[in-house]
DNA sequence: CTGAAAGCGCTAACAC
DNA sequence: GTGTTAGCGCTTTCAG
């Protein structure tokens, strides 16, 4: 809690000006080597570290990459691990920022605007609603919103994954298959919806609107939708959820309703966050390589920061079906 | 990539001074309501957001909590989820920073010093080596280093957990039980070592120094130690690893050596990170409630930030044995 | 080789 | 009510 030494303290203690300290610390030319030694000795003694904030205000380069998330939930945490791993041996520090404050909309604008131009040299936005926000630094979006995007994007094959999931349920013998949708503003959500519909259509199963619920990736909304769907006399025998968190919530609701999973109801999610396999019963899902997503984003961002026009501005990674214990043939 | 509007731009566009903009934006008294309206209209139009950096330099309060980690690996990611969850409905933004740059020592000093005093109002340090670093803000340490600590601490019962793990191996019938230690500078590592030794002593099993390896929680070091231990003619029939990452590496080494886990070798880890249960075979381990650790730290930090002397400055949470597929009776 | 001075974007006193 | 002024801690010209 004691006061941190500033460059002024160092300058005073070393008997030089702050300008000289700055040069010595940053290894600029034009400082006598004995002066450098003396300054560095004082720096070590006082335990001085330059303030990231103050220096970034002037120099505009910080050596820090920012990852902007709405929230530190399982999905973004996995992304973060991937980004961290990819950056481990680089000269960049990593700063993850969550500034949503519950305001679902516009957090990315705010966060990016507050940090860019000063604190960070480049940014990775995770599931941003708005992509075309002004920023003074290169930005890569992971799993972004729908709509035109003139920004580099990294995402997974949500359509293909949804197709696999729904087909799998169909192959198990299900024909009354529900869907709990995700955030409607995300490309990936829309694609999962489309994949679900396509699989049904391919199999000649008519779409029952009563079996499509809106979850927005939020527990309460999922709960309401699942409750409504599962209380119907002609309730589905299987539900595909647009992400794992939703899938897990559905399993919970089913259990409260006394519906046995997977005997009476199959549930399959999307993402394969760690929580999916840890749950009891372990959630069947579609795996997307979240850590790879993060690493790919780092690669693109690095290119951008070096000023190269990126060769690819849109990376789409494959998904894989992971059947576990929440899927079975219908009763 | 276009330039972010600054307060000066807003002032110019609204035809007022920057001071007035600042007051209007921050809701200070002494501004005509029509002026406020006009300014806010411009703010909205330009998409202005105050720079977190610039404002924090002056006002010293930012509404941001910092979590300082060496690295975004599984353990700290879990902590982060817990912290994020605990902070979700608060008015605080969350900033996680990893500035280790591979320099194992001193990252916490550097990070804390670079961020505190300006960017963050309070900090949570995860597995810091140095605890007594100067900071201008309240700091809580999670699973900190050994040695005297005059700071609030949150940790789990490492001794008890290690005791459980080792006893479990003994109950399975093992008597040649190895141990791969963790970072020697952490309290928790020392406690796990002590728990291991105590369990052995309680069972009357003499400690074989050849069966104690140094891993430092680093894959390479673990690999070397495990290789050496497992190539001995009198190799252990079970190994207790000081954390899951180490445990997982041991399983891998065993597999390369053609040693079957768990038939020929039992392995048990510590932490229960998501990767443990996802591995094949699923790693037996000792669960520590990582997300709760994070939430507890938030609680203490909040108290500190409100200026109260904390009632408890040291929280120790219980651990629980989680047997999975890497432990079995000896051959 | 070193230091004085300007200024990054913003807020807080203090004048007007 | 509003503008002017003075910095926060640092880097960067530019004189000396």
Image (cartoon, coloured by chain):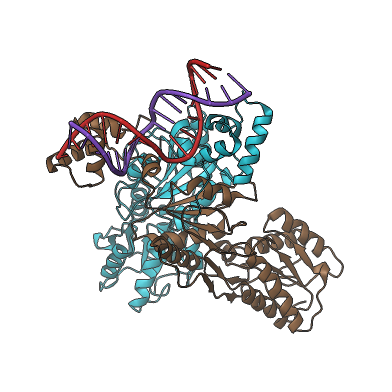
Chain colours: A brown, B cyan, C red, D purple
Please name the residue shown 41% across and 73% down the image.
B261
Q: Quadrant of the C terminus of chain A?
A: bottom right
- From the top left corner, tell me how far across and down residue B150 is, in percent: 37, 33
Dividing the picture into quadrants, the one containing residue B237 is bottom left
Please name the residue shown 28% across and 70% down the image.
B227
Left or right placement of residue B306 versus residue B161 in this view: right
- From the top left corner, tell me how far across and down residue A314 is, in percent: 53, 70
> Which is more toward the observer, A116 or B329?
A116
> Which is more toward the observer, A169 or B271?
A169
- From the top left corner, tell me how far across and down residue B28 is, in percent: 60, 27
User: Is residue B122 visible in this depiction of the protein?
Assistant: no
User: Is residue A151 visible in this depiction of the protein?
Assistant: yes
Left or right placement of residue A292 versus residue A196 in this view: left
Judged from this view, the residue extending furthest toward the right is A233
- From the top left corner, tell me how far across and down residue A183 is, in percent: 68, 60
> Which is more toward the observer, B258 or C6?
C6
Q: Quadrant of the N terminus of chain A?
A: top left
Judged from this view, the residue extending furthest toward the left is A34
> Which is more toward the observer, B311 or B305?
B305
Please name the residue shown 59% across and 49% down the image.
A107
Left or right placement of residue A37 versus residue B192 in this view: left
């Amino acid at each position: 809690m004691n006061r941190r030494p500033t460059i002024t303290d160092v300058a005073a203690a070393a008997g030089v000006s702050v300008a000289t300290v700055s040069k010595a610390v940053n290894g600029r030319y034009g400082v006598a080597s004995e002066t450098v030694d003396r300054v560095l000795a004082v720096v070590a003694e006082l335990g001085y570290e330059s303030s990231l904030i103050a220096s970034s205000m002037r120099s505009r380069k910080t050596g820090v990459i920012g990852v902007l998330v709405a929230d530190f939930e399982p999905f973004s945490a996995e992304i973060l691990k991937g980004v961290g791993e990819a950056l481990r041996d680089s000269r960049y520090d990593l700063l993850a920022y969550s500034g949503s404050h519950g305001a679902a909309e516009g957090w990315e604008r705010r966060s990016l605007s507050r940090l860019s131009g000063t604190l960070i040299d480049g940014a990775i936005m995770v599931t941003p609603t708005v992509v075309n926000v002004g920023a003074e630094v290169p930005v890569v979006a992971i799993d972004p919103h729908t709509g035109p995007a003139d920004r580099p994007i990294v995402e997974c094959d949500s359509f293909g994954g949804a197709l696999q999931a729904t087909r799998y349920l169909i192959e198990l013998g299900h024909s009354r298959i529900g869907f709990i949708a995700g955030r409607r503003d995300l490309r990936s959500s829309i694609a999962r919806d489309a994949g679900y519909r396509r699989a049904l259509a391919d199999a000649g199963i008519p779409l029952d609107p009563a079996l499509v619920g809106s979850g927005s990736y939020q527990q309460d909304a999922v709960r309401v939708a699942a409750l409504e769907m599962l209380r119907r006399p002609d309730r589905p025998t299987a539900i595909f959820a647009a992400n794992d968190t939703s899938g897990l919530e559905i399993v919970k609701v089913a259990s409260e309703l006394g519906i046995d999973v997977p005997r009476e109801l199959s549930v399959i999610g999307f993402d394969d966050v760690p929580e999916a396999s840890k749950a009891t019963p372990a959630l069947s899902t579609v795996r997307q390589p979240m850590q790879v997503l993060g690493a790919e984003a780092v690669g693109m961002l690095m290119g951008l920061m070096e000023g190269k026009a990126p060769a690819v501005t849109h990376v789409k990674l494959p998904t894989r079906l992971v059947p576990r214990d929440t899927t079975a043939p219908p009763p």
